[in-house]
Amino acid sequence: MITAGSYTFKKVNMTHSIVVKTAIADTASLTINIIGNGSVEYSIDGGDFVKYQGTTKISKGSKIILREIVGDNKFQGWSGAISSKSGTISLSDVDSDILLNALFDNDDDNGIPLYLVFVVILLVLVLIIVIFLMLKKKKS
């Protein structure tokens, strides 16, 4: 791959046409920071959706569709190049690098629901009151 400079062809006996194409100038980068616990997938120019794994090179002029992958954690929105609360966004005619943040709820502890904690506390308080009343009655 020649990235700069020149090249001399030796022993050329006839006229030739050489076409040079550069991929570097015709691509842009798609970078998505996943904030929280979640996943994102993307489609380029109507192709199949692919799970985002890291910075991806795309052809300039492409149309990209990004969407959150539904999981246990609530999707909160996009920030960066585009701000949106929608789970799916489209970028048309991409002409430069794109940096986005996909924001997910960080609730990954799968702990006990808060209402259940209150029920247990209430039951313990009732049990303490019943024991107190039984002890008071026994003294009388």
Image (tube, rainbow, N blue to C red):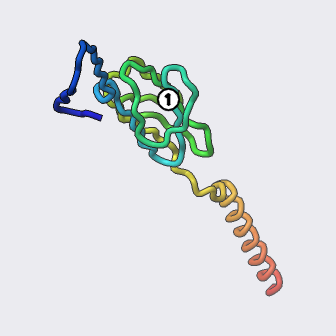
In the displayed structure, 93 sits above or below 107; it is: above
Left/right placement of residue 138 relative to residue 36 reads: right
Examine the image and state in which quarter residue 70 appears. Answer: top right
Task: Label 1: state its secondary structure.
Answer: strand
Task: Give how far across and how far down residue 96 sits, in percent.
Answer: 31, 26
Task: Give how far across and how far down residue 44 sits, in percent.
Answer: 49, 25
Label 1 crowd (10 A; few <14 / some 14-19 / many >=20): many
Residue drawn where x is 58% and y is 45% of the image: 73
Task: Give how far across and how far down residue 131 sits, in percent.
Answer: 77, 77
Left/right placement of residue 80 relative to residue 54 reads: left
Q: Nearer the viewer, residue 55 or 66?
A: 55
Left/right placement of residue 27 relative to residue 65 reads: left
Q: Quadrant of the C terminus?
A: bottom right
Residue drawn where x is 28% and y is 21% of the image: 20
Q: Residue furthest bottom?
A: 139
Identified by mark 1, the residue type is Leu
Q: How many marks?
A: 1
In the displayed structure, 95 sits above or below 36; it is: above
Examine the image and state in which quarter residue 125 appears. Answer: bottom right
Task: Give how far across and how far down residue 89 sits, in percent.
Answer: 48, 25
Left/right placement of residue 132 relative to residue 60 reads: right
Please name the residue that numbered disc 1 is placed on: 66
